[in-house]
Amino acid sequence: MEKRLLTPKEIAQATIDAGAGKAKLSVIHMIILGIFAGAFIGFGAQGAIIIGQTYASIDLGMSKFIFAAAFPVGLMLVVICGGELFTGNNLMVLGCLNCNYKVRDLLRNWAVVYFSNFAGSVILALLVANSDLMTGAAAEKAIAIANAKVAIPFGAAVIRGILCNILVVLAVWMATGSRDIISKIFSCWFPIMLFVLCGYEHSVANMYFAPLGMFIGAPITWGQIWMKNLIPVTIGNIIGGAVIVPLSYYNVYIRTAKVSPDAEDGPEKV
């Protein structure tokens, strides 16, 4: 009978194997899957805007929770349907540390996927902005979100990006360890809901939120979107998702096993 859940050590190895596959993707495949992933995250963001403005008049905490509850569908689509998401691909650092592929392969993937995510997000934002769906309270909500994104101080945006991508890559980590679709859905939902609820910052989500607001009337520019949000948030996302989590888990689950083949899989689950 197939295992329903991988151990952390098995997830680490599965993540390395997945990273090796990502490193071998052709540029055209990365572009296609990257555009899809950007649009998928945008779909989740759009759903959050719609339900967020619908329940804006109720308790503030509950309104934030409802907004956060709709957003994770984007990562579910990426994980289950297939997509290349920059923030999730930060886990490819594990394979680099394990010498399964070179740093240049990782950077090639990150660069192509990042700008493909941007293209997919902006294309969807353009389509939605011209769909006559963004009117009234929905438009006000989208504009308010865009204005808020470029008003975050640089340092705070970096910190929020760090905290965000710790949770995003842990969602991908959990989904990798899940063997059935329901488990993958729940693995995506809880951490992603949590980062949105807490107000952390996700670079690919902001590639949709900020341009959409700008397209429908927010008084912001591309320069502000990049300099005041995407750049600091991306830096934070890399620190959280490509440094803190993979380095920690590499040392616990991969490096330790190389040094001592009989090492335990890490702390036992309670």
Image: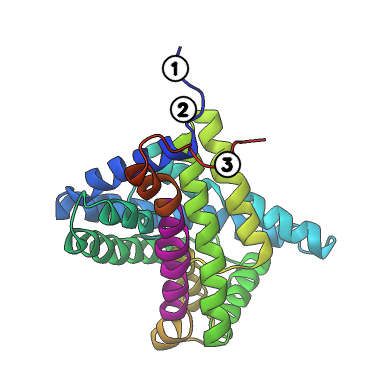
Q: Does residue 68 appear left or right of residue 246 in this picture?
A: right
User: CA gap, disc 3 to disc 2?
Assistant: 21 Å
Q: Secondary structure at mark 3?
A: loop
Q: Amino acid at mark 1?
A: Glu
Q: Does residue 95 appear left or right of residue 132 in this picture?
A: left
Nearest to N terminus: mark 3 or mark 1: 1
Question: Which numbered disc, 3 or 1, marks the residue closer to the eye?
Answer: 3
Disc 1 marks which residue? Answer: 2
Q: Are marks 1 and 2 in contact (CB under 8 Å)?
A: yes
Q: Amino acid at mark 3?
A: Pro
**Relative height, residue 11 to residue 118 (above, below):** above
Q: Quadrant of the C terminus?
A: top right
Q: Which mark is residue 179?
A: 2
- Residue located 57% across and 72% down the image: 160
Q: Are marks 3 and 2 in contact (CB under 8 Å)?
A: no
Q: Position of residue 214 (x, y in %)?
A: 48, 78
Nearest to N terminus: mark 1 or mark 2: 1
- Image mark count: 3
Q: Residues within 10 Å of mark 3 (few under 14, many from 20)?
A: few
Q: Residues within 10 Å of mark 2 (few under 14, many from 20)?
A: some
